[in-house]
Image (cartoon, rainbow, N blue to C red):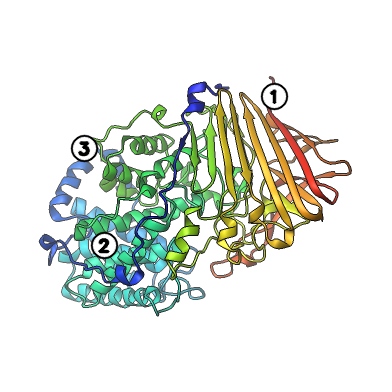
């Protein structure tokens, strides 16, 4: 195993979130911001993401620096391989999203290649999709949610790209559909419309409003309402850019980074290109490179699964309903090409390096065609060695550490922070129309994940309909977990000021040693009676971990400490093995006299269908070691873990 060198340990970079002294305009001020196309683009099509002159440059890219990627795009266009689902439209999960990507991809293919077969396919799919009813699910937020955002984006851009190839009748049909659906989304997201408060940092907000922006910019000068649609979309995205954590950590987890962040970039690109105003100047976007670099495990295919991420151990075992979608062709679909755009726009060689690292692992993207626009072949990547091996996402309360950027590295992470970062506590009073929706974050304060020798040794359980602290490597108090564990968003009824007191107290790095101290008592409801839950997590190179828990309660309470593994846990008499038979954590637990240890399967309620997320089936996700202590007002538990492997 690569040893943890002094240099590696000393290059931890702590990102101190900018104090919440940033000017926070009122929503009314944001809505009143004047919106206009760049004068040179008035009455011009295409204009949203590219102009005719820029398409000529992209054609050159497609035949030279991006030839391999573009050839693959053309070979796999869904719109060339079949007919669109007919109206009233498909209802399977994400199926209308897929229609949108098919429309966008084949429309760009025509714009680059000028081949009539692409134009015919683009028209066929467009003219089917405009007649879907509703856009989205009949049973959950029809016409105003994710599918509406996807279709507004794709059909709005297609209208812009194909404007001169559509007949007057076709143009009128598409425009009428876009106007109707943009109006529905506008009404839902405007003040006094479908919502009194808005979930600005949640993907169900910024995806639909990104689509609204693209359609508005495509129709400005033709549709009298386009200006107010554009102003509303800008207001929501200004909020998202300012309110999401500037340290770059994505609170919904890596699955939702993959799904959601392209829409932040689509808005930024469309807005800057069409209006000339840039909203890129945020640490959020600059620091995504660190989140991407550290979230990916050394094997290049697995991720630290804090938050709602697939089906945990089931997906890691290449099973379950999510695997084929998450790993098409056997490698991760990570949407890493978003980072190509960040690198190009910010002129950041380190972001380019992380994107190239993902590409080297042969990941794929939902919108492969965007690589043609996003990757700057002239931007040379920095060496990965320029990116520190440890990262403290200080606002979010997460520390990632690895011993190298090589495949044989040991890696671990520790988490102790509020669901959307400390900065939120001071921002909430300044944004009265903001409603947090943190359900994709988990009640996992003072938890950790360990990876070694190419294996997940102890980690999380994936996307759950009803999340609970017991599903993570942390504790419950007399069975009481973190937040209010009665609905998917366990934090909704918790005062954020209390959640904000959960934090990483110290990160100490010396040669061959990492020590992290977290305090998480405030993440538990008052019914837990918890006054102290201080966890000291120590790594001593090359392979030893110690977890010291100090737990104090107002009255005598039992404590349940959980450790999770993907494979059955072996052992007894306080000596256990977590992990597969070839690599494992030799684990010894020192608990108060009278404690008991139980091993078994981890059961949870899986997510149900959209709109019924808490009504899924109960299923097993990996295995757990549960240590239960006698009732006491003060409890101390020490867990010692050593990485072992067969034959060594």
Whole-angstrom CA distance, mark 2 to mark 1, is 56 Å
Q: Can residue 105 be seen?
A: no
Q: Are marks 3 and 1 in contact (CB under 8 Å)?
A: no
Q: Can residue 391 be seen?
A: yes
Q: In the picture shown, does residue 123 fall above or below 3?
A: below
Q: Are marks 2 and 1 in contact (CB under 8 Å)?
A: no
Whole-angstrom CA distance, mark 2 to mark 3, is 25 Å
Q: Is residue 151 left or right of residue 322?
A: left
Where disc 3 sits, the SS reads loop
Front residue of this view, candidates 498 and 317 = 498
Q: Nearer the viewer, mark 2 or mark 3?
A: 2
Q: Earlier in the sequence, mark 2 or mark 3?
A: 3
Residue at figure coordinates x 77%, y 41% from the top left: 636
Residue bearing mark 2: 157
Measured as percent of width and height from the top left, residue 390 is found at 50, 33
Question: Mark number for residue 646?
Answer: 1
For label 1, the crowd category at 10 Å Cα-Cα, with few meaning under 14, some 14 to 19 and many 20 or more, is few
Residue bearing mark 3: 64
Residue at figure coordinates x 61%, y 48% from the top left: 312
Measured as percent of width and height from the top left, residue 556 is found at 83, 54
Dividing the picture into quarters, in which one does residue 361 lie? Answer: top left
> Among all residues in the image, which is located at the extreme bottom?
192
Q: Earlier in the sequence, mark 3 or mark 1?
A: 3
Where disc 1 sits, the SS reads loop
Measured as percent of width and height from the top left, residue 448 is found at 62, 42
> Among all residues in the image, which is located at the extreme top?
648
């Amino acid at each position: 195993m690569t040893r943890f060198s002094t240099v590696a340990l000393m290059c931890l970079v702590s990102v101190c979130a900018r104090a919440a002294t940033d000017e926070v305009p009122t929503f009314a001020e944001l809505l009143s911001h004047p919106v206009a196309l760049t004068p040179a683009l008035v009455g011009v099509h295409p204009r949203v993401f590219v102009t005719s002159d820029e398409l000529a440059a992209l054609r050159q890219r497609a035949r030279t620096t991006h030839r391999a990627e573009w050839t693959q795009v053309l070979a796999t266009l869904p719109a060339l391989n079949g007919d669109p689902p007919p109206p009233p439209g498909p209802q399977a999960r994400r199926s209308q999203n897929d229609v949108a990507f098919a429309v966008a991809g084949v429309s760009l293919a025509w714009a680059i290649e000028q081949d009539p077969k692409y134009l015919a396919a683009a028209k066929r799919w467009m003219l089917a999709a405009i007649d879907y009813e509703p856009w989205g699910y009949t049973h959950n937020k029809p016409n105003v949610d994710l599918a509406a955002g996807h279709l507004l984006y794709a059909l709005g851009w297609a209208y812009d790209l194909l404007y001169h190839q559509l007949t007057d009748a076709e143009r009128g049909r598409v425009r009428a559909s876009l106007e109707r659906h943009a109006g529905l989304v506008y009404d839902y997201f405007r003040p006094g419309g479908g919502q009194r408060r808005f979930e600005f940092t949640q993907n169900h907000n910024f995806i639909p409003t990104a689509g609204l922006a693209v359609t508005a910019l495509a129709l400005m000068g033709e549709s009298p309402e386009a200006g107010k649609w554009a102003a509303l979309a800008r207001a929501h995205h200004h909020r998202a850019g300012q309110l999401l954590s500037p340290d770059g950590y994505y609170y919904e987890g890596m699955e939702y980074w993959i799904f959601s962040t392209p829409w932040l970039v689509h808005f930024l690109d469309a807005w800057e290109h069409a209006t000339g105003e840039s909203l890129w100047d945020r640490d959020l976007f600059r620091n995504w490179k660190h989140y991407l670099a550290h979230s990916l495990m050394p094997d290049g295919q697995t991720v630290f699964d804090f938050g709602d991420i697939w089906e945990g151990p089931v997906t890691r075992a290449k099973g379950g309903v999510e695997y084929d979608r998450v790993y098409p062709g056997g490698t991760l679909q990570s949407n890493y090409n978003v980072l190509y755009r960040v690198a190009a726009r910010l002129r950041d060689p380190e972001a380019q390096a992380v994107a190239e690292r993902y590409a080297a692992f042969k990941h794929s993207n939902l919108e492969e065609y965007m690589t043609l626009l996003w990757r700057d072949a002239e931007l040379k990547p920095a060496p990965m060695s320029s990116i520190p091996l440890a990262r403290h996402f200080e606002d979010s309360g997460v520390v990632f550490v690895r011993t190298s950027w090589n495949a044989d590295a040991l890696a671990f992470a520790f988490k102790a922070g509020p669901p959307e970062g400390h900065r939120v506590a001071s921002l909430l009073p300044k944004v009265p129309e903001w409603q947090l929706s943190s359900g994709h974050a988990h009640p996992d304060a003072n938890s950790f994940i360990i990876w070694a020798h190419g294996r997940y040794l102890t980690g999380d359980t994936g996307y759950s309909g009803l999340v609970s602290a017991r599903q993570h490597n942390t504790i419950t108090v007399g069975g009481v977990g973190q937040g209010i564990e009665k609905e998917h968003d366990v934090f909704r009824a918790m005062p954020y000021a209390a959640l904000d007191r959960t934090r990483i107290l110290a990160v100490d790095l010396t040669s061959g040693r990492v020590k992290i101290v977290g305090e998480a008592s405030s993440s538990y409801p008052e019914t837990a009676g918890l006054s102290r839950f201080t966890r000291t997590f120590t790594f001593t190179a090359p392979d030893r971990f110690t977890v010291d828990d100090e737990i104090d309660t107002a009255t005598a309470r039992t404590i349940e400490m959980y450790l999770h593994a993907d494979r059955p846990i072996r052992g007894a008499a306080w000596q256990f093995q977590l992990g597969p038979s070839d690599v494992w954590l030799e684990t010894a637990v020192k608990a108060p006299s009278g404690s008991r240890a139980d091993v078994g399967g981890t059961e949870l309620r899986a997510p149900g269908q959209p709109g019924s997320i808490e009504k899924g089936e109960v299923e097993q996700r990996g295995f757990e070691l549960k240590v239960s202590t006698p009732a006491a007002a003060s409890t101390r538990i020490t867990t010692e873990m050593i990485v072992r492997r067969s034959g060594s």
